[in-house]
Amino acid sequence: MNPLMMNARQPEDPAVPRPTEPYGEGVPLAHAVGERPVVMTIRNLRAGYAGGASVLKGVALDVRERAVTAIIGPSGCGKSTLIRCLNRMHEAVPRAWCEGDIHLGGRNVLHLDPVVLRREVGMVFQRPNPFPTMSVFENVAAGLVLNGERDRAKIAETVESSLRRAALWDEVKDKLASPGVGLSGGQQQRLCIARALAVRPRVLLMDEPCSALDPLATARIEELLVQLKEELTVVIVTHNMQQAARVSEYTVFMLMGELVESGPTQRLFTQPKDKRTEDYITGRFG
Amino acid sequence: MATAAAPDRIPSVARGAAAVPGPRERAGDRLFRLGVAAFALLILALTAALAVMLAVESRGTWRSFGFSFLWSTEWDPIGGKFGALPFLYGTLVSSALALLIAVPLGVGSAIFLAELAPRRVSDAVSFAIELLAAVPSVILGLMGIFLLVPWVRAAEPFLTRWLGWLPLFRGAPYGIGLLAAGLILSLMILPYIAAISREVLLTVPRPLKEGLYALGATRWEVVRGVSLPYARSGILGAIFLALGRALGETMAVTMVIGNTPQISASLFSPAYTMSAVIANELAEASSPDHLSALVAIGLTLFGLTVVVNGLARLLIRRLEARG
Ligand SMILES: Nc1ncnc2c1ncn2[C@@H]1O[C@H](COP(=O)(O)OP(=O)(O)OP(=O)(O)O)[C@@H](O)[C@H]1O
Ligand SMILES: [Mg+2]
């Protein structure tokens, strides 16, 4: 029994409201995305920290498969809190709570064992956090070893393919045994992406993965995202609206713990339906 | 004045120092630096003087016995025979026994306090642990005599029954002896290991632990995979600090170890330590040879602590270099 599970509360009312605005139906999709299947359904999600008021005040959202969903909004609106609820990392904060419904392929995430969930929903953090006592190789292999993989050849194979998928292999193939923290910031972040990819998650959560990186390293990660969404679902929090516009198919705008508007990225940026979205994307506040 | 200060202001900023406000503060800085350096030198000088003093006062012993003093087992002050080995043995075995018991317990409780217990429980227990560290050793010695020794005496026959195939656990159950000394020492050093290891474990950055949690690790896997490796050099430092304490501890040990200079394979048998023999015999040492031999034991103990500390340094640097 994992003690992290204790904080997950059941909503009192099992009746789940549908989201009011599911991705702007009827609006022609600007990116050629088609209508992709939903991989994660979030309904009536409330969350907060010890003793405080709700930080998320009933969020509803559908995350679509093999696409990038960007979450934008001013600082403190709850973007990190939302994304951290999706893999239950939120509960690692002492006395933090969350309630509502998050479904991943028909299972309620809040009732899953977080250990199982996190192998399906990976995460990349704001600051690159390679494990300092591990080499490049060991960093990528860490998740496999946790999963009980003992076959060395298989581990080596997965490490290589993960590093290739993270567009890092060519840069590190000669220093796999050197410490992961010896890489540049951008390389470290791609190492963390490789580390997350190695356990083959269905969904990859990224919380401002480029905010500690220079423009060149940022561009590399954005290119990488374009490739990654061929095979998995990405939810990315970003402060940078250009980044959201460049990399995402869907965009979610949040304000003060509420999901104001969500929809295909191009539609949201060109024809926002909510006045507050328009104000934000035109830079009139925030 | 200002022009004179200008040239060396530039390099100090370039070196990454904080902005240099003015010549006055810099004079203060220099004074501070010199003062600190002087104190550091003073400590070095004191240590060197200590070693020299011990060497000079024990020169008689070294002259007559040479290095065989270290491995001779005879200690007969009246007959003028002096050998340090039984004391070296007593000190090393009682300290090793203490580490054997206190390291798993101390590191284990530090893991519990830092990683598993709620913060308030952790703080309360840590306070109790720090109190334990502050108990004077003579009090622990009393506890040893009245509580621990009877328990050990009662337990020894059982140890013999189950583990008697090892020579370590054979012999008459006196209660007083190496086992009791090791136990009391482990109780003394446990707070150091637990308290320092807990502090070190609390410094493990959250994002690192979350990084492993995000890969689907359990708490225990995070402790083993991230926290302990990150904290290992600090924990090792705590262990060596505790070892230093155990090697030098006098009062509590002499009260329960039996003060008999002998080397026996059994942990049940009475023994003697270096610090205990110095404390017990110094006042009655009438002959200069006896006095000199006691100081020679002091020098041996000093050398042992220097070696242990050196090894600790080496090991910790190794670990840190590995990242
Ligand atoms: N550990 C915490 N304890 C208490 N309150 C917190 C904690 N973390 C965040 N909060 C509060 O929750 C609210 C939302 O925080 P969150 O980190 O989700 O915002 P964000 O949208 O990610 O902001 P940013 O863009 O600055 O990262 C903020 O008001 C913040 O003060
Ligand atoms: Mg954030």
Image (tube, grey):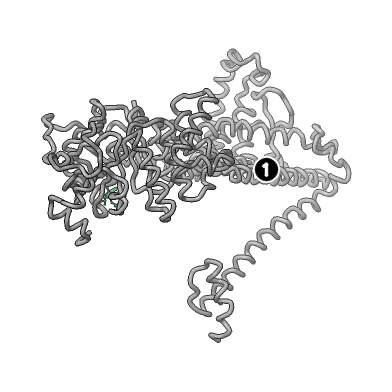
Position of residue A130 in the picture relative to residue B255 (left or right)? left
Q: Is ligand 1 within 8 Å of the beta carbon of the residue shown at mark 1? A: no
Instruction: Name which residue type carries label 1.
Output: Leu
Position of residue B171 in the picture relative to residue A2 (left or right)? right
x and y percentages locating residue B148 in the rendered image: 54, 29
Is residue A109 or residue B280 the one in the foreground? A109
Quadrant of image for the N terminus of chain B: bottom right
Q: Answer yes or no: is residue B218 visible.
A: no
Is residue B283 or residue A98 the one in the foreground? A98
Where is A204 relative to A242, above or below?
above
Quadrant of image for the C terminus of chain B: top right
User: Which type of secondary structure does the marked residue at label 1 adopt?
Assistant: helix
Residue furthest right in the image: B64
x and y percentages locating residue A120 in the rendered image: 34, 30
The residue lying at 61 percent from left, 30 percent from top is: B97
Q: Answer yes or no: is residue A97 visible.
A: yes
Position of residue A286 in the picture relative to residue A203 (left or right)? left
Where is A270 relative to A226, above or below?
below
Q: To which chain does the residue with label 1 belong? A: B
x and y percentages locating residue A214 in the rendered image: 42, 55
Q: How many marks?
A: 1
Where is B9 relative to B100, above or below?
below
Q: Quadrant of residue A92?
A: top left
Q: Quadrant of residue B81?
A: top right
Is residue A203 or residue B21 the one in the foreground? A203
x and y percentages locating residue B122 in the rendered image: 39, 40
Is residue B321 or residue B159 the one in the foreground? B321
The residue lying at 41 percent from left, 35 percent from top is: A197
Q: Which residue is mark 1?
A: B311
Check disc 1: other Cα within 10 Å, few if <14, some if 14-19, many if 20+: few
